[in-house]
Image (cartoon, helix red, strand yellow):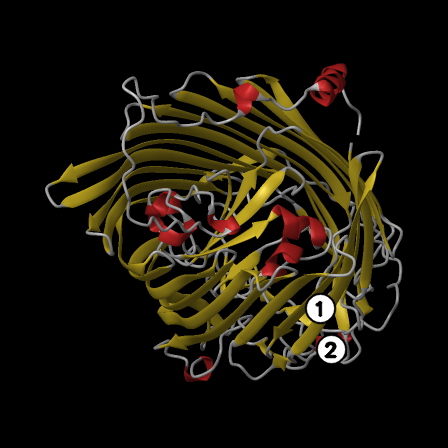
């Protein structure tokens, strides 16, 4: 990465910055000295003090429940800490999804931007991802080097994001200025090279900066899929006064890597018998890398109006420009093995044949802008105490895209290490045109009512107005959607004692309809919006000063959209008929089980069914890409006789996963075991930390994903054994 003189100057300045002393410390509070001598001693009643666990010391920053602490938030929220990101050496969204059993992959190819599911629902890239609680484009590889933690809100949160899928949202929280000077170097068993720096400090008592930069030369476990990635991020805090603070964040990342096509069912009915996790289907030498340039910026201003009232203003801009290139392995329309028409052309052929398409869509640009204002306050009315949040937000999303090239060039077979050479298409993409403009204007209000010491009632609503226009390849208006909807949210909390919170919530959300795939009778038609409803009951227990236990039982309803078999010439019509109902139980534990043993564990049980669809074969079984059971366990054991050395270990399990909507085909269940070491020692008076992690220790083959994209189903293998080694020096 080329660094400008300004960046180098900032690095040098921050490297010289020293931690603050008296001006950085919180003032002590002492009683005034008595002018009349020493007063007589008074016996006071015993005061019991109990602290929250370390992971609960911060507010979530999630507006859905009034910016409360995790313990007081009536929702299931997972926090992936900086320690987890470092020890597990997590760098992609798919790797992040391993940290909680309620998460899974949904069309997450190597080399491409990735999507995940939460509670069995794929996230909407427009509203499912947030940076510092502001919308960011989901069509990017979000860098993690500059993130202090990642918050995952599971379930419906209509107040949070308005129009969204019901699974939840992922919020990336940036690092703040601090006296930090770290450098990290790393490699892996395939020969990748990694370097990162994290430098920060307070230049004055009121103004601080933090810079993160990283470069990665990626040697993928998939042949022909090597790539590169570079990122730079800046965070700044300005304590304008005792009442006003300003936070600025900006990051930029550029990456390039060939995208890896997924497998498909053979003949639409069989799982490939001899798949390879290291083979690039459809590879052609002319296939260019997928280039993604992304940037995310935000500004947040907090002003304390009085002891009980605060104003929060925020704005964010996110942009992702994608040069999408792939020799795409898809279907078998041109294969002799499918000539009879008995096999649907949108699956691989029964003998493993697949068609190769030259797909090019340069400068596919997604932009998200959001502005938000929130007034928070506290008010006592008689015996009741109220915590209010009142706010408004405006969200704009645009998509600019060319008329892409998507041309058949040849037919290959899954058993070929490399397919034959096929010349690329001579056609070129069309001009860049606006394809979508979407506006959301919203007003929201929330009241948290304290009924004595043990009960709280939360009531809120978000009123959203959506105006969305889409355009065809010529720039002509194709769709004009306008709607207004009030999305209520309510909760009851019971806290019988300080460590325990029991809650019951109800919430509603709105999600946009899905575009029909091209191979149905109404191909490319966008169906109407869908209203989702969720009921959730949960418990959070601080079992000790350092251990939190959680449990949640939920039920989510959403109208079911699917390709319904019928008597049309195409054989299917894309419809909205019946409901998709997910009923689940989640259990979690995170914290310390002793002085030397830390654990992060979660389990997720989901019954995901389609009901009243008019298609009996699609009902009575699990829906596609939602395993009935998942679990994830990660342990960190510091050796008592060698406290500088810690043993790290993990276990991931998923039950069998449905790969067809009629439930007749499933990929097998899998167990994956991970291991690692962390060794910390002083060197020249500074901490030196070595980390070794080995994912998939036993090199087990498994299918990690049976998700869909654009109405088509794909199978993606999990990664084989991968060892990573890094060293971090705090200089």
- The residue that label 2 is drawn on is 272
- The residue that label 1 is drawn on is 263
In percent of the image, x 12 and y 46: which residue is there?
Answer: 383
Q: Badge 2: few (under 14), some or many (20 or more) residues near its Cα, within 10 Å?
A: some
Name the side, left or right, on which 285 lies relative to 353: right
Q: Position of residue 403 (x, y in %)?
A: 62, 42
Disc 1/disc 2 C-alpha distance (Å): 8 Å
Name the side, left or right, on which 707 lies relative to 728: left
Numbered disc 1: secondary structure: loop
Q: From what the image shows, is residue 607 above or below residue 458? A: below
- Determine contact: label 1, label 2, CB under 8 Å: yes
User: 283 or 671: nearer the eye?
Assistant: 671
In percent of the image, x 43 and y 43: which residue is there?
Answer: 59
Q: Quadrant of residue 667?
A: bottom right
- Which corner quadrant holds the N terminus? top right
Name the side, left or right, on which 383 lies relative to 217: left
């Amino acid at each position: 990465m080329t660094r400008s003189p300004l960046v180098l100057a900032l690095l040098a300045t921050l490297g010289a910055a020293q931690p603050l002393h008296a001006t950085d410390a919180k003032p002590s509070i002492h009683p005034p000295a008595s002018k009349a001598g020493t007063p007589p001693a008074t016996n006071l009643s015993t005061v019991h003090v109990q602290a929250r666990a370390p992971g609960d010391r911060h507010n979530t920053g999630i507006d859905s429940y009034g910016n409360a602490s995790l313990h007081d938030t009536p929702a299931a929220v997972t926090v992936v800490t900086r320690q987890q990101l470092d020890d597990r050496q997590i760098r992609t969204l798919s790797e992040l999804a391993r940290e909680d059993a309620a998460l899974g992959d949904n069309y997450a190819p190597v080399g491409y931007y990735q999507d995940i599911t939460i509670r069995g629902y794929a996230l909407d890239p427009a509203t499912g991802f947030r940076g510092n609680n502001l919308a960011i484009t989901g069509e990017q590889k979000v860098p993690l080097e500059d993130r202090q933690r990642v918050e995952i809100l599971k379930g419906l949160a209509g107040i949070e994001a308005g129009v969204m899928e019901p699974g939840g949202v992922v919020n990336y929280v940036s690092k703040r200025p601090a006296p930090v000077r770290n450098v990290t170097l790393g490699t892996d068993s395939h020969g990748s090279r990694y370097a990162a720096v994290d430098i920060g400090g307070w230049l004055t008592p009121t103004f601080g900066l933090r810079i993160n930069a990283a470069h990665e030369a990626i040697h993928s476990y998939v042949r022909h899929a090597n790539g590169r990635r570079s990122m730079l991020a800046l965070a700044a805090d300005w304590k304008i006064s005792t009442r006003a603070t300003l936070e600025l964040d900006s990051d930029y990342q550029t990456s390039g890597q060939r995208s890896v096509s997924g497998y498909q069912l053979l003949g639409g009915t069989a799982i490939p018998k001899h798949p390879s996790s290291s083979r690039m289907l459809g590879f052609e030498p002319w296939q260019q890398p997928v280039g993604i340039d992304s940037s995310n910026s935000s500004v947040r201003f907090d002003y304390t109006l009085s002891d009980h009232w605060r104003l929060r203003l925020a704005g964010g801009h996110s942009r992702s420009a994608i040069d999408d290139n792939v020799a795409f392995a898809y279907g078998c329309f041109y294969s002799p093995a499918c000539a009879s028409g008995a096999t649907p052309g949108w699956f691989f052929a029964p003998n493993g044949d697949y068609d190769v398409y030259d797909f090019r869509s340069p400068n596919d640009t997604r932009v998200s802008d959001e502005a938000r204002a929130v007034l928070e306050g506290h008010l006592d009315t008689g015996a009741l105490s109220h915590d209010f949040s009142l706010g408004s937000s405006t969200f704009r999303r645009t998509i600019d895209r060319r008329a892409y090239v998507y041309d058949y060039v040849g037919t290959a077979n899954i058993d070929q290490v490399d397919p034959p050479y096929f010349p690329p298409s001579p056609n070129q993409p069309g001009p860049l045109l606006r394809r979508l403009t979407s506006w959301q204007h919203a007003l929201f209000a929330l009241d948290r009512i304290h009924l004595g010491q043990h009960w709280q009632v939360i009531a809120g609503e978000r009123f959203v107005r959506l105006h969305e226009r889409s355009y065809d390849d010529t720039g002509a208006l194709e769709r004009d959607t306008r709607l207004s909807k009030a999305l209520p949210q309510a909760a009851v909390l019971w806290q019988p004692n300080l460590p325990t919170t029991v809650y019951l919530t109800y919430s509603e959300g709105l999600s946009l309809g899905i575009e029909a795939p091209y191979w149905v009778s109404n191909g490319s038609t966008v169906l109407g919006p869908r209203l989702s409803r969720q009921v959730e009951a949960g418990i959070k227990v601080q079992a000790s000063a350092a251990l939190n236990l959680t449990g949640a039982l939920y039920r989510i309803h959403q109208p079911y959209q699917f390709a319904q078999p019928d008597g049309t010439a195409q054989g299917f019509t894309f419809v909205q008929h019946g409901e998709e109902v997910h009923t689940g139980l989640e259990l979690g534990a995170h914290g310390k089980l002793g002085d030397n043993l830390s654990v992060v564990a979660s389990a997720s049980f989901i019954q995901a069914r389609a009901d009243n669809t008019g298609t009996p074969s699609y009902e009575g079984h699990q829906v596609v890409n939602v395993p009935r059971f998942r679990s994830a366990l990660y342990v960190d054991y510091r050796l008592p006789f060698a406290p500088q050395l810690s043993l790290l270990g993990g276990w991931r399990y998923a039950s069998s996963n449905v790969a067809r909507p009629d439930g007749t085909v499933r990929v097998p269940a899998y167990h994956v075991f991970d291991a690692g070491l962390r060794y910390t020692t002083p060197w020249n008076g500074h901490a030196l930390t070595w980390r070794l992690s080995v994912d998939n220790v036993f090199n087990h083959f498994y299918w990690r994903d049976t998700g869909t994209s654009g109405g088509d189903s794909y199978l993606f293998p999990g990664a084989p054994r991968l060892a990573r080694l890094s060293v971090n020096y705090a200089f």
